[in-house]
Image (cartoon, rainbow, N blue to C red):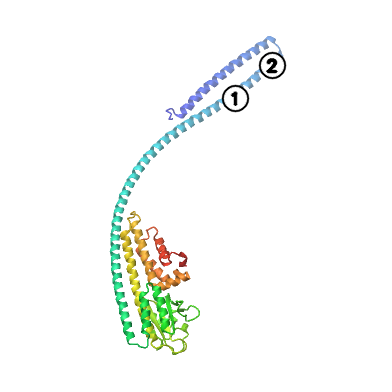
Amino acid sequence: MKSDVPIHDVIDGLRTRIQVEIDAQLSALGESHGLALEQVRVEAERAADERWAVRLESARAEWSARLASEIESVQAEAEQRLEAESIRVRLDAEHAAAVEARERLEHALAEERQRAGQAIEAERAAAQVAIDAERVVAQAEREAERENARAELDRERERAEGAVAEAQRALEAERRSSEAWLDRAPSVDATRLLEAIAALDAADTLSGVLALTAAAAAVEAPRAALFVINGPRLEEWQLPLVAALSHESIRTDATEAGILRQAVQSAVAVRAGDGLTAPECAALGVGREALAVPLALGGQVVGVLYSDEGTEGAAPAGWPDAVEILGRHASARLAYLTAIRTAQALRLIRDGNARAPARPRERSDDEQGARRYARLLISEIKLYNEAAVRVGREKRDLLRRLEPEIDRARRLYDERITSSLAGREAFFQQELVQTLADGDAALLG
C-alpha cells in the first residue's frame, strides 16, 4: 500500500523515540548509581576505616565499568532495532510500490488484450469474407472447368467414333484389296489366307491379333517371327505355335537390324536386296529372300512381322505377298480395335460421370478430373503398346519396358492437374497398378 510519510521522516521519528528511551534508561541508571555511591559513602564514613575507603574505590570502578558496558549494550541494541525498523519500513515501501506497479501493468495488459481481441475479430471477419469470395470464385471456376471437360470429352468421343468409322473403312478396303489380289494369284492358297484374314477380323484383343498374324505368317513362309519395339531395341515375341528363329529370345539394337530397321523407319514393307540385308540374328545365307512388314498402331510402328525362306530348301511361291497382306491387314485390324476401345473408354467415362452421385464439393470435381485423366493416359499406353504390356507383365518390368511412354503420360498429367490437389501423385500411381499392371503392383518392377 502507498504511504504518505517519507521514509526519512519515519526513521528520524524512530531515532528520536529510541534516544528518549536511552536517555531515560541512562538517567535511571545514574540515579541508581548515585544512591549506591551514597550508601557506600555513608557506610565508609560510618566505619571511618581505610579498608572501607579502598572498597569504595573498587566499587566505584566496578560500577563505572558496569555502567559503561550497559550503556554500550543499550546503544548497540538501539542501533540494531533502528536498522531492523529501517529495513522493515523500506521493504514495506518497496512492496507497496511493487503492488501498485503490478496493478498498473495488469490494467495495461487488460486494455491490450481487449484491443488485440478486437483486432483479431476484425481480421477473422475480413478473412471469412475473403474465403467466402474465394469459394464463390472457385465454385464458378469448377463449374466452368467441368463444362469445358464435358465438352472436350464429347469432342474426343466424336473424334474417336469418327476414327472407328475410318478404321472400319480402311479395314474393309484392305480386305477387298486382299481378295482382289488373291483372285490374281493362283499360286497362293486363297482359302487358307482368307481364313487367316477372317480369324484376324474375329480377334478382339491386340495381343490376339499379333499372335494370329505371327502364326499365319509362319504357315505361309518357311520362317516367321514377330518383333516388338522396346525403346531402341527390337525383341522377339515368342509364341507357342510359332517356331523361334533361335533357341533363345532375340533382342537386337534397332540400328543393327537390317531390313527390320528400315521397316521401322519407313513404315512400309521392306524386302532384302539392293543393299538391304536380313538381320544378323536370322543367320540367313546370301541370296535368300527375307521380308519385314511394319505393324503400325495410331500412326506409330509398334512391331515388325519378319519372315524369310529359311536357310535351305525351296520356299513356296508367293509367300512374300501373302505375308505382306497379313501384315497390312493386321495393322488395319489393330487400328480398328484401338479406335473401338478408345471410343468405348470415352463412352464409359462420359456415362460414368452422368451416373455418378454428387460428392461433397471439396472432393468432387478436381479429384474426379484427375482420376479420369490418369485413367485415360494409362489406358492409351495399354492400347498402343499391348504387346509390350504383355511381355512386361510376364517379365515383371513394366516400368522399365514402358519408361518413355509412362514418362510422357506423367508429364502430360502434371501439366494438366494442379499440384495443389491432394493425392495427385497417388491417383496416377493407382492407375499404373490397376490399369497397366492389372491390379498387381509387383508387375511394375
Q: Residues within 10 Å of mark 1 (few under 14, many from 20)?
A: few
Snapshot quadrant of residue 104: top left
Image position of 93 with respect to 274: above or below: above
Determine whether label 1 and label 2 are within 8 Å by CB.
no
Quadrant location of the N terminus? top left
Q: Which mark is residue 299?
A: none
Image position of 367 with respect to 388: above or below: above
Closer-to-camera residue (316/207): 316
Whichever of labels 1 and 2 marks the residue nearer the N terminus, that label is 2
What residue is drawn where x is 43% and y is 71%? 390
What residue is drawn where x is 40% and y is 37%? 106
Q: Amino acid at mark 2?
A: Arg
What residue is drawn where x is 41% and y is 65%? 432
What residue is drawn where x is 69% and y is 16%? 55
Circle 1 SS class:
helix
- Residue 47 at what x, y percent from top left? 69, 10
- Residue 370 at what x, y percent from top left? 36, 61
Residue occupied by mark 2: 55
Q: Amino acid at mark 1?
A: Ser
Closer-to-camera residue (39/200): 200
Closer-to-camera residue (302/49): 302
Q: Does residue 391 appear in this view?
A: yes
Residue occupied by mark 1: 73
Left or right of 21? Residue 323 is: left
